[in-house]
Image (spheres, coloured by chain):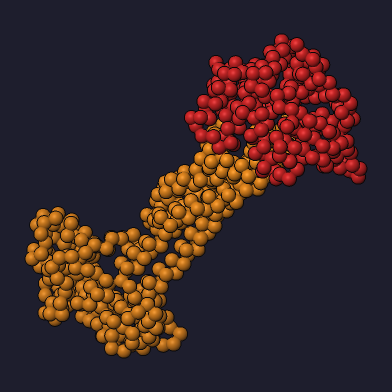
Chain colours: A orange, B red
Amino acid sequence: MITFAEMFKIAVLALYRNKMRSMLTTLGIVIGVAAVIAAFAIGAGANKSIDEQIAAFGSNSIIVFPDRAARSLGGTARHLTLDDAAAIEREVSGIEAVAPAINLTATVIYGNANWSTRVVGSNSEYVAVQDWEIAQGTGLHDGHVRQAAKVAVIGQTVAEKMFLGEDTIGKSVRINKVPFTVIGVFAPKGQNLMGSDQDDFVLVPLTTAQKRLVRWQTPDRISMIFIKGVSMDALHYIQHQTEVLLRERHKIRPGEPDDFAVRNITQILEARRKTTMIMSMLLGSIAFISLVVGGIGIMNIMLVSVTERTREIGIRMAVGADAKDIRLQFLLEALILSLVGGVIGIGLGVFAGFSLSSFTQAPPIFTVEAILLAFAFSAMVGIGFGYYPAYKASRLNPIEALKYE
Amino acid sequence: MPLIVLKDIRKSYTMGDGKIEILHGINLSIDKGEFVALMGPSGSGKSTMMNILGCLDKPTAGTYILDGEDTGNLTDSQLARIRNRKIGFVFQSFNLLPKTSALENVELPLIYAGIPNPERRLRAMEALKLVGLHDRMYHEPTQLSGGQQQRVAIARGIVNRAPILMADEPTGNLDSKTTAEIMELFVKLNQELGITIILVTHEPDVATYANRIIYLKDGHIINDVRAQKA
């Protein structure tokens, strides 16, 4: 009996004799597989970037800030105060930590280097609430805040720009002309969801910022309040309680708009993840359809090929091929076309994934599973759509086939 | 024991409502080493008989015993095996695989017989040498003349050492000079290798190369003549 290796050789030779047609047929599968691979990779990449943004913002995190829009409407807008923060910590349940903060832009000077950056004045909880990690030195202690110590923990970008890799701990920098001692450096986080560099900032004690850097007329005034909930599920509840509490504290009558905003960015990002998922599923199904279309292309060509090669089939049958041999040959031809298409498609898909990812700003992620899946799927397409033409070829009557013109 | 025995072989086709019988009970026996020419006008049933003898078609009724084996009980797959091992075919239109070298064309039956290289290649070369085409082994059919193509087909027919070679109007597409060459090749294969040759033709000149001529008409054998050759 004929061996599988011989059969494979026959199939390859037959495809080789029709190079152009084989190539064009394969193209359908190439495009289908490439589209599937690229769609999955871009989807996975976007998903991961959202995960990273959530991690960067601080998980289970809520932010409270004054709503300028409401204030400009002439309402009795009030600033957020330290007392507001204290009241939230005292009265809202489900909270792990609260960090009131003052935000300002300031120029930091070290030696000849000066760098304009964001300065945050906050308490010792800030690091935990915002999920920062200290790379070198230490973070802020309660003592620093109590004594309004002139110390600073600097972000990675500031450390790189100002110190150019020099040792930073213990060095003195001037922030708006006030000397501060650097006590620590944050581990880098990268860009946030708006695309700005989160590592470009300096953390100082809240009290120091109040007295030395901003000198607001309301001494108690703060820019924002960061809240960390005990869990993701608690966030909605915390958000609601905070809103009720602040309306009460700011004496906002029913019907009047809030003069503050409570935002849960994790929820916003989760919503965006859902959108991304729907998008990548949509892309994936279009890709899937193109793969099916590619498969139909294979079937079409194989059917033409069977008709065109009727005489060849007759000759093979006359010299001793049985129906099974003919079926296997044509099935193998379809399978080889689709598998070659699958391999090229995977290559093209990886390339397309990287090219297209410049639009999504998230690097694509290629998993072994997705690649194996695409490969297995193209094999299935080959067998699925190759079977009927192969069956048809095997059913030919050798006498008729030999007479076919 | 005869190589081929046909007992009351009938073949009929259904056409629309009616049934047309092409062969009306053929009885025939052919011995090993014979060179038989099958003659008759078109519609006489000689092609149908050829197809049955070649195991490409099954009779509607009757018994066909080939080399001691009753072919009536065999499956299509087993018939394919018989064609592979016991019968070589030569056709009027050569029927070589296009874009395929002479050598690869001759190898084809050996591939389906499961004979591996290098034996396969050596046997194909040997067969091509036997038909006088050892210098055209790597040519494709389009690069060969009609006579040369038919030689390749004959080499393909004998490469598996089949005891029977069936030729259906093998010279129908050839000029008279080439016809003579091809017929002499058949005679040589018959005499030197003892291959049984069954030749279908309507040309009396061609039939004279055989040592037995069977005349068919309207599905009956009307004459069976053994030539007395010197």
Q: Nearer the viewer, residue B58 or A393?
A: B58
Give coordinates of residue A314: x percent, y percent: 68, 35
The quadrant of the picture occupied by the N terminus of chain B is top right
For residue A359, say whether it is visible.
no
The correct choice, above or below, for A202 with respect to B20 in the image is: below
For residue A93, say whether it is visible.
yes
Q: Is residue A27 left or right of residue A214?
A: right
Q: Quadrant of residue B157?
A: top right
Q: Nearer the viewer, residue A300 or B1?
A: B1
The correct choice, above or below, for B150 with respect to B114 in the image is: above
The quadrant of the picture occupied by the C terminus of chain B is top right
| Count of numbered marks | 0
Q: Nearer the viewer, residue B20 or A70?
A: B20
Which residue sits at x=31%, y=71%?
A58
Q: Nearer the viewer, residue A229 or B152?
A: B152
The correct choice, above or below, for B168 with respect to A115 in the image is: above
Q: Quadrant of residue A109?
A: bottom left
Give coordinates of residue B120: x percent, y percent: 53, 30
Give coordinates of residue A96: x percent, y percent: 29, 82
Q: Quadrant of residue A149?
A: bottom left
Which residue sits at x=52%, y=27%?
B121
**Residue at the front extreme of this rendering:** B1
The correct choice, above or below, for A20 with respect to A381 in the image is: above
